[in-house]
Amino acid sequence: MRYEKGRKDASRSRIVEVATERFRGDGIAASGLATIMNDAGLTNGAFYPHFRSKGDLVRESVVAALEAQSLQLLKILASGGPERAIEEYLSTAHRDNPEKGCASAALLPELARQPPETRKAYTDHFLFLVRQVSAALPQTKDTEGVALGVFATLIGALQLARAVEGKELSDRILAAGASAARALIHRRQDETAS
């Protein structure tokens, strides 16, 4: 039985959506294709008409997650600037829902072990996010460097806050990360004003 193109596209989108959430929530290695396909409401055999391998699905899922994050970041920056972005990123809601959050914070160690084409796709999309933040910051000699520092601070703080035992310490890490990210931005603002 043949299905129309729209149905195939919808199935592919559903697989990517489920995989994106699974990978961020459980990790890439711990997310089997059978579970992903079952969660998508499809049979295992339906995977291969859409993707050649799990690696292809990983790459497309990471790209989809970063594209969604980029759209969300644009909205946040437009409504509240970098301060609001820091607040949203290091929120307890983001910490407590990795399956819906930042792919970088959830997957960096596993992404480092992916094939070059996946790492290249990640790098390209990550740099796009960095440029979005950079454009929202006061311009300096190295505004992109400041944005990289902010991302490193935010991602590291979120990963630590998720890893430690105890809500009190986790909350303190989120607050310290937010303070450090703000300090990076404001220190650069002070340097440009002088």
Image (cartoon, grey):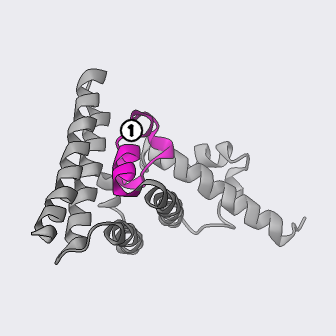
* Residue 26, above or below 131: above
Q: Is residue 166 visible?
A: no
Residue appearing at x 67%, y 43% in the figure: 38
As shown in the figure, which amino acid type bears the numbered disc 1? Ser
Please identify the residue farthest to the front as the structure is shown: 194
SS at circle 1? loop
Residue appearing at x 39%, y 72% in the figure: 128
Q: Is residue 89 magenta?
A: yes
> Going by the image, does 130 lie left or right of 65?
left
The span shown in magenta is 81-107
* Residue 21, above or below 171: below
Mark 1: give few (<14), some (14-19) or many (20+) Cα within 10 Å. some
* Residue 155, above or below 167: below
Along the viewing direction, whichever of 72 and 76 lies nearer the viewer: 76
Q: Which residue is mark 1?
A: 91
- Name the image quarter holding residue 91: top left
Mostly what secondary structure, the magenta segment? helix
> Going by the image, does 143 lie left or right of 91?
left
Please identify the residue farthest to the right as the structure is shown: 1
- Name the image quarter holding residue 12: bottom right
Residue appearing at x 38%, y 74% in the figure: 124
Where residue 120 sits: x, y (%)? 37, 74
Where residue 162 sits: x, y (%)? 32, 35
Q: Is residue 187 visible?
A: yes
Along the viewing direction, whichever of 194 and 23 lies nearer the viewer: 194
In the picture, the quarter occupied by the C terminus is bottom left
Where residue 48 sits: x, y (%)? 65, 64
Q: Is residue 31 magenta?
A: no
In the picture, the quarter occupied by the N terminus is bottom right
Query: Count the marks: how many?
Result: 1
